[in-house]
Image: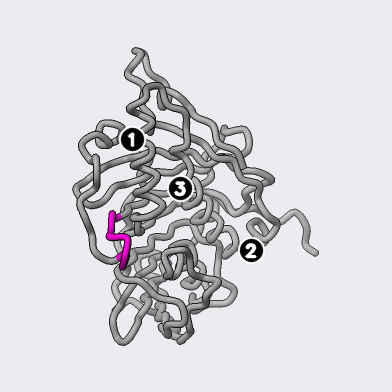
Amino acid sequence: QFLYFIGGGGRRKKKKKYNIMTKARLRFTVNWVENATPWGALGAVFRWCDTAGGTAYDAVYEKEEDKELVKVWRSMWEENGVMRSNACEVFTDRFGGEVVVEVCLTKVGRTSWGVGFEIYNNDVTKVLARMDTTIVYVDSETHSKSLPIPEADKLRPHANPVGPYTPSVPPPSPSTATKRKTHTTRARVTDCDSFNHINNAVYPVLAFESIPCSPPPPIGYCKVEYLKQILPGETFSISTFMSETPTTAYMSEFVVGGEVVATCLMKPLEEKYRTKPTSKL
């Protein structure tokens, strides 16, 4: 993996003030399992974006005051940032040997901020996936109480309001369910991160495992909303229903003690993006 900065944030007719958080890129080598299985590919998209968002602001800076702002940003991400939602679109079921993740700050509110990601092929000529993330600034002790973002007024001018954004997809109604599946499991230590809760990239994989059809298809849209934390060793259930009205969709709820702590909406990858088999073997 290596990081480099893309100055200017794209095509511009006029030279504008240097923006420390406009565009940055991180390159990843794609592991075999991330290409061989649809759940591996889905989990990889979330992990790549999670990693890129946590390291992109090591990018070079032009002025000394920018250096201090980057330190504030890194502290927000590493010590006080908890995911509120992740929404992604995927346009392929094969990622190839390497991918490049481009990341930018999209918005800064009072207690939350947004980050947009685009995943490209190796030579950065084709968008393979897109992610739109909302993160909440929380206390360092419990990671559950939202707090005002420090230096928000200084960070806000560096946001790129044009995105990338992922379009909102309405969830299917439970009344349209054609199949249902519920199972109970326990939060494994290996599914958790340094904040002592299940990592955000694990939820879509767990939801995929709960899809009530066999085999589940590759996923083209996934949105996870994180309402509360699931802690190591905690017992929880995943309840998923499949709807085919108006189009196929899968809706999962993560439940702890009768309370919904997370939801995951998934839709199959469109046929036009699926790889055609080259052999009948």
Q: Is mark 1 on a helix, strand or loop?
A: helix
- Mark 2 or mark 3: whose residue is earlier in sequence: 2
* Residue 113 seen in the figure: yes
Which circle, 2 or 1, is nearer the viewer? Answer: 1
Quadrant housing the C terminus? bottom right
Residue type at tag 2: Thr
- Is residue 166 in view? no
- Disc 3 crowd rating (10 Å Cα; few below 14, some 14-19, many 20+) is some
> What secondary structure is found at the residue carrying circle 2?
loop
Of the two numbered discs 2 and 1 on the same chain, state the one appearing first in sequence. Answer: 2
Examine the structure image and report whether residue 183 is included in the region drawn in magenta: no
| Chain part drawn in magenta | 136-143
At x 35%, y 39%, the residue is 105
- Give the residue at mark 1: 69
- For label 2, the residue is 37
Quarter of the rendering containing residue 197: bottom left
Residue 37 percent across, percent down from the top left? 64, 63
Q: Residue 220 location, x and y as percent?
A: 48, 56
Identify the amino acid type marked 1. Answer: Leu
